[in-house]
Image (tube, grey):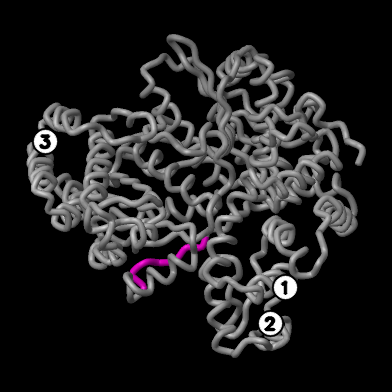
Amino acid sequence: MIYAFEERIGDPSLFCGRKQQMALLMNWVDMIPKKGAKSRALLGRRKCGKTAMMQRLFNILWNQNGKVIPFYLEVQDANQSLLAFSEEYYSTFMSQYLSFKTRRVLPLNNRPWKWEILIEMAREIRNDSILRHIDFFREDLEKERAEQAFKFALTVPGECAGLENRFALVMIDEIQFMTKYIFYDKAYQIQAYNLPGFYHGLVESKLSPMLVAGSYVGWMVQMMREMFVGGRLKQTPISPRLTHEEGLDAVYRYAEFYNRALSDEVAVVINQLTQSDPFYISTLLRSEWEEQDFSSVEGVINTLSYEIRNRRGELFGTWSEYIFSTLKTVNDQYAKKILLFLSKERHKEWTREEISTQIDNQLEDRELEDKLRILEYGDLIAQGSSNFRYCGIQDDILDLIFRDLYQDEIDRVKPNIAAELTKSVAAWEREKKSLMGALNELKGKMMELIVSRSLNKYRKTGQPIAHFQERFRPLLTEVGKETREALLTACSKSLFDEIWSNYYLQVPQTTQLEVDVLAQGSDATSCWALVFEIKNRDEKHPPSMAEAQLFLKKCERLKQELALQGKTIRFVCPVYLSAQGFNNEVETWLHEQGVLTTDLAHWERDSASLSYENGSNISAK
C-alpha cells in the first residue's frame, strides 16, 4: 500500500486493532457512491485513535482511486484569521485532490503545495475547471474577502467531485477548535465562534458527506446541538480501548518496534494494567526512565508507576490538560472532591443527591448541577442513565493521576501507586486463576497474532521460515501437485521483509477486501508474497465453500496489486489456516486451487515461533 498521506502514528504497522470500527467506517464509505451515507462525528478523548483511523481511511481511499475522493484537515488550537484559515483549507484540499488525480504522494508532513505547483499540476492533467477555481479563490484572497473565501473553500470538494461524477469525503479533525481559535479579523479581536455553522447545509450533502472528530466530547456535543441541529451528524463514540485480543497484539507490536524483549506473562500484565489502551501501551514501552525494567512484572509495575507520576511525561501531560483546564473553570474544592469521589467509585452511577452528601450538602441543587455539567463538559466524568445520575470515567490511569494530584490535599492521604498496581495484578490473577491461563485463553482467539509473531521472528533474524514444508496438512488430491511443491520450495527459501496483519488490498476501482496476514518480500526486479486466511473454527463449524471462494478472490486481487508495482511476481503462496481443520469437500477444493491448508497444531510445530528471543520464559514476580 502506498502511504500518500504521512500518518501521525509513524510506522504503519503500529496501527493496531480497531477492526470493528474500521469495518463500520468502510461499510459507511461504501454507501457514499449510493448516496446513502449520513455525515457522522467520531467522539472520544485525545489519544483514543480517532486521528489514526481518519488518516488510515484517507490512505485506503487514495489507494483505491475509486469513486470517493478523500480530504483530511486537522484544525489547530492556535489563533488564526478566517482569511488564513480559508487559504489553508482550500490549498490543503486542492493538494490532496491533485495528489489523488495524479497519483503523486503528498509532501512530507502533508503540507499543501505552493500555488505555483498546484497550477502546474492542474495544467498537466489539463483540468481547466480547477484552474478557474484557483483563480476565483486567489482573487478573494488578494481582495481579503474572508467570509466569501471561506464559503468558496467549503463548497469546492463537492464541486470538484461532481464535475467528475465522483464523490468527496470531507474529514475535519478537531472541528470544535473552529469555535475558539479562528477570528474574522487579523488582529484576533472578533471571534468566529459560530464558524462550524457554515456547514449546516453542507453536512447533509450526499455528494460530499462529512466525517468530523473532536477530542473534547462535551465540547463537541454542545457544538453539535447548537450548530448541527436536527441530528445532522450521527454520533459515533470511539473508545480508547482495544479488545483484550487486540490489546495483547498491540503490546507485542510495540515491544518489537521499541526493541523490548517481553515474556508472555509480562505482556499480559501490561495489557491488563493499561486496559488495552494503545496510547498507554506505547507510552509505557518507550519509557526513558533510567530504571525502566520490562524483565518482570515488578519491573513493569515500577516503570508504569513512574510514568504516571512523572509530571513531564506523556501520561500526565495528556490528562493534566483536561484536569487543569476544567478545574480552572469551576475553581473550588467541591469540584475536586466530587471528582475524586466519582473517580474512586467509577464503576457505579451516583445520583446528584448521593453526590451532594459527599460534600456535606454544601451546594444548592442548581449550583451542584452546574458543576457536574462543567466536569462532564471537560470529559472528566460521564452522565449516567439519566440527567440525574453521573459516574466517573472508566479509566484506571486517569484515577491514579488525579489521586496523585489531589488526594493528599483533600483526604490528607498520598496514594502509593506501585502498591495499588501490584494489588490490581494480584486481584486479577486470582480472578483469572493464573496469568498464563488468561494468556492461553486469549491466544485461542488470536490466531492472526500467532501467525504474525511467527513470521516476524524470522523477518527480524533475516532467515527463511523454519520447517516451512512440515507445517501443512496432507494433500487430498494429486491435482496441481507440482505447482504446490514448487510453492513450498520457493517459500521455504525466501525472505519476507514486511509482515502485515489485517491488510487492506489496494487495487484502483475495486471494492475493499482485507487479508488476515500478509508477508511480502522483494528485490530490485521481482516481488513475492505469502498470504493467509485465518479462521478460529472447530470441527462443528469448519470454513464454508463460500469463505474458501472469497479467499481465492482475495489472492487474485493481491496479484493485481503486486502487478501495479511494476516488478515480476515470483510467486503468491496462499495459505488457509483453520484452527481445528476442514471438511473434506472444502479442503479438497482448496488443494485443487493450489491453496496450502494448515491447522493450529501443524503450524505451531516450531514451538519457538511463539516468542521473541526469551519470550516463552516466565519471569519471576
In the rendered image, residue 234 lying in the magenta stretch gets the answer yes
Label 1 amino acid? Phe
The residue lying at 68 percent from left, 48 percent from top is 245
| On screen, residue 127 above or below 469 | below
Q: Which residues are magenta?
A: 231-237
In the image: residue 395, left or right of residue 124: right
How far across and how far down the image is residue 345, in percent?
Answer: 74, 72
Image quarter in which the N terminus is found: top left
What residue is shown with label 3?
A: 127
| On screen, residue 344 above or below 590 | below
In the rendered image, residue 245 lying in the magenta stretch gets the answer no
Depth check: 549 or 197 in front?
197
Residue 50: assigned label: none
* For the residues bearing labels 2 and 1, Cβ distance under 8 angstroms: yes
Alpha carbon of mark 3 to alpha carbon of mark 2: how far? 63 Å
Is residue 538 visible to us here?
no
Indicate the secondary structure of the residue bearing disc 2.
helix
Within 10 angstroms of label 3, few (less than 14), some, or many (20 or more) residues?
Answer: few
The tag earlier along the polypeptide, 2 or 1, is 1
Within 10 angstroms of label 1, few (less than 14), some, or many (20 or more) residues?
Answer: some
What residue is shown with label 1?
A: 341
Q: Quadrant of residue 348?
A: bottom right
Alpha carbon of mark 2 to alpha carbon of mark 1: how far? 8 Å
What residue is shown with label 2?
A: 355
Residue extending furthest toward the top: 524
